[in-house]
Amino acid sequence: MKELMEPIRTLVDFRRGVVNPDRVIERKTSDMQGMYVDELALKKLLSQGNPFIYQIREVNIPQETGHIIYSTTIIYPGKVGQEYFMTKGHFHAKEGTAEIYFCLEGEGYLLMQTRQGRVSAIHMKPGVLGYIPPYWGHRTINTGNKEFVFLTLFPGDAGHNYQIIQKCGFAKIMVEEDGRAVLKDNPKYTPLNG
Amino acid sequence: MKELMEPIRTLVDFRRGVVNPDRVIERKTSDMQGMYVDELALKKLLSQGNPFIYQIREVNIPQETGHIIYSTTIIYPGKVGQEYFMTKGHFHAKEGTAEIYFCLEGEGYLLMQTRQGRVSAIHMKPGVLGYIPPYWGHRTINTGNKEFVFLTLFPGDAGHNYQIIQKCGFAKIMVEEDGRAVLKDNPKYTPLNG
């Protein structure tokens, strides 16, 4: 019989995320090329030190059916042109799997999209839990002026598909207009079957 | 094609749990008969108004593969004799599924046990996330003097098996001794194959 896995105790700082992660993934401005409308603004940021956009703090959980993988994400405050700092966004490789985002600190949006281009957005603040049903791609955006921190959880066998978003983009972008976050059509969006 | 499920926004008050649950489950002292060592103390509590032991605030999520079901639990402070207020505890019907408990408020223990009677305990305080691997039964215990509040998450197809715990009990109990929480052998424990 297979050896049973031992329980894990993870300490999460509500302001900084997982305290002792097994792995830290950091995304800099250079990792986000092609994802923002304003390419000149992105180039300018690159020349100004290529700042970090977000950081994921992961815990080792088996990528297998029956497990729930969890990590915390910090998105730093900032903009590329008028667009706020955000994650790359993805669908799941096994698309019939959900994901949960639970906000601990800061504020922002959980932006979701179906393969057909239907969009839904949830405003996140501490205590807001966003449930991403199966088949919805998703991205998070920091629209506040401090770090946006949240816990994410998804089935162990979900996997990631970044290609759809890299190819098509999201149908909507979140931009600052007159000091407010506004959802607008993405001029660079290419529908999947378009 | 099956209609896609819409995203859900759930507000969680870190001190009280899910603000607008679809369903509230309340367990009173009378629901816990047979689960405590000190049966006289339990009878006395019943005669003193049958107080609530814990409350679960649930959100409607499909009980299907690929989903993640979530809810919050509040365990009230108190004791039955020397034993602290606690949940009934359960295994999953589909035993190869994990569960996550994330503490928001108060303190207590996440007590886990295998079918073979091996025990593990995690001390919970705000920010502690306990990962219950597949095949481990689990119960939570409020060892503090205020409400112990946590978020729970498990795969949509996990299901519940309360029978094993009802029949065997847990191998360990958490009792107050000299003002401290102490894990001791449960004199009423009956091993599954015993």
Image: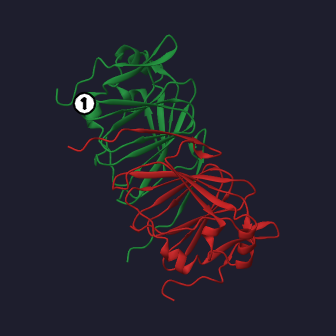
Chain colours: A red, B green
Above-or-below relation of B126 to A18: above
Above-or-below relation of B67 to A16: below
Q: Amino acid at mark 1?
A: Lys
Above-or-below relation of A165 to A56: below
Residue receiving disc 1: B167
Judge by depth and name the residue closer to the eye, A28 or B6: A28
Judge by depth and name the residue closer to the eye, B114 or B167: B114
Please tell me which residue is depicted at 68% across the width and 65% down the height of the picture: A85
Judge by depth and name the residue closer to the eye, A136 or B40: A136
Please tell me which residue is depicted at 24% across the width and 32% down the height of the picture: B116
Above-or-below relation of B74 to A56: above
Q: Secondary structure at mark 1?
A: helix
* In the image, farthest residue toward the bottom: A194
Which quadrant holds the C terminus of chain B? top left
Q: Quadrant of residue A7?
A: top left
What crowding class fits label 1: few (fewer than 14 Cα within 10 Å), some (14-19), or many (20 or more)?
some
**Residue A165, position as x, y percentages in the image:** 53, 75
**Residue B50, position as x, y percentages in the image:** 45, 25
**Residue A19, position as x, y percentages in the image:** 57, 42
Left or right placement of residue A48 versus residue B179 in this view: right
Left or right placement of residue B83 versus residue B33 in this view: right
Please tell me which residue is depicted at 57% across the width and 77% down the height of the picture: A169
Judge by depth and name the residue closer to the eye, B170 or B59: B170
Name the chain letter of the residue that bears numbered label 1.
Answer: B
